[in-house]
Amino acid sequence: MTFVDPSEFADLVLAFRHTAFRLEARDRYNEPSEAEVVRHFLDTGELDGFYMADWVEELGPRIAEGQWMGRVRVVSEPHSDYTRFGLALAEYNTAAGEDIRYLPRHHPVVAGLPDHDFWLIDSTTLLLLRFGEDDILLGADVVTDPAVVVRHCYYRDVACHHAVPWSEYSTRVHLPEGP
């Protein structure tokens, strides 16, 4: 197992050739690069699409070429501030072709899923995300052990099967608004 810092980790995620999947198991993320955008959203309910322009530019053409990126967000209800932010942000991700789904934490299947975040790249490489006590991403452990990777492929399949696509989930819940 190799540890990579956040900059190397991002390059590994974007190096996917066929599929990339993320399980988000946390209710809070504290990324310094997002702090201003999150604060603005929580204060005003507004989210500027410019914040997502680079991601949309990177992801859109890849999805159009047949690559797939998806994520399942395990969320507490009522939603945390960060989940509210993520719900609003998902409009841009999904417009670029990313498959974002929501799985309420109270759903029975969640008990069988891991409580850690991970990326699964091309069903061959697992990135186990590490966070500090302050919820800041420290980096990821790169795992290629087939038994561990296959187990996480199973988690992906279960989570995707039971989770609700953003387009449907966002109509069921009160979409994020500022105070």
Image: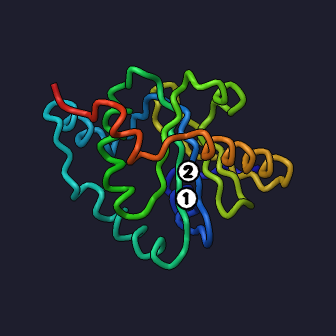
Q: Is residue 173 above or below residue 164?
A: above
Q: Residue furthest bottom?
A: 65
Residue 34 at x, y percent in the picture: 31, 43
Question: Would you name the residue on which mark 2 appears?
Answer: 5
Report helix, strand or loop for mark 2.
loop
Amino acid at circle 1: Glu
From the top left corner, tell me how far across and down residue 54 is, in percent: 32, 65
> Residue type at mark 2?
Asp
> Does residue 21 lie above or below 42 as drawn?
below
Q: Is 22 on the left or on the right of 144, as rendered?
A: left
Tell me the crowding category of disc 1: few under 14, some 14 to 19, or many 20 or more residues within 10 angstroms, Cα based: few
Residue at 59% across, 54% down: 21
Residue with the mark numbered 1: 8
Where the C terminus falls, by quadrant?
A: top left
> Which residue is drawn at the image coordinates 46% and 35% (left, top)?
136
Position in image of residue 122 (x %, y %): 67, 64
The reply to whether the C-beta atoms of the residues labelled 1 and 2 are less than 8 Å apart is yes
